[in-house]
Image (cartoon, rainbow, N blue to C red):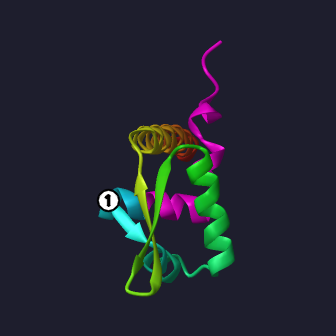
Amino acid sequence: MGENILDAIDDAIHAKARLGIMSLLAVHGQCDFGFLRNELQLTEGNLGNHIRVLEEAGYIEVTKSFVGKRPKTTCTSTDVGIEMFQKYIEGLEKIIRMAQSGAQRQSET
């Protein structure tokens, strides 16, 4: 018996908003709260909750500072977060290849 194909699907990343956060961080390296909110079209509260989940999992680091008198929250992927995101992507690719292979076999019959 082999490993479960769904084992690579990390629940901390799999939610649509958290997948979006991790994807944007993979592309940009670090993102501020406003950028993430605008790109993902989330409310501040919803985005804050998703950031907290990723931070508690150790996948992102959150830095809070001030620019002038305005607060600024910046998110950066941790080494663990980058590794887990890569494993997540590889797991999805494996599932996609399996599904495409099955669909191709069915269309040939």
> Where's the N terminus, which quadrant?
top right
Total numbered badges shown on the rendered structure: 1
Residue 68, position in %: x, y? Answer: 37, 86
- Where residue 53 appears, x then y in whole percent? 64, 54
Residue at left offset 39%, top offset 60%: 25
Q: Which residues are magenta?
A: 1-23
Residue that lies at the very extreme toward the left in this rendered image:
28
Place of residue 92 in the rendered image (x, y in percent of width and height, measured from the top left): 51, 44
**Residue located beneath label 1 in the image:** 29
Which residue: 54% across, 47% down? 107
Classify 34 as above or below 19: below
Quadrant location of residue 51? bottom right
Front residue of 22 and 99: 22
Q: Is residue 22 above or below residue 48?
A: above
Q: Element under label 1?
A: loop
Tell which of 35 and 69 is nearer to you. 69
Residue 18 is one of the magenta-drawn residues: yes
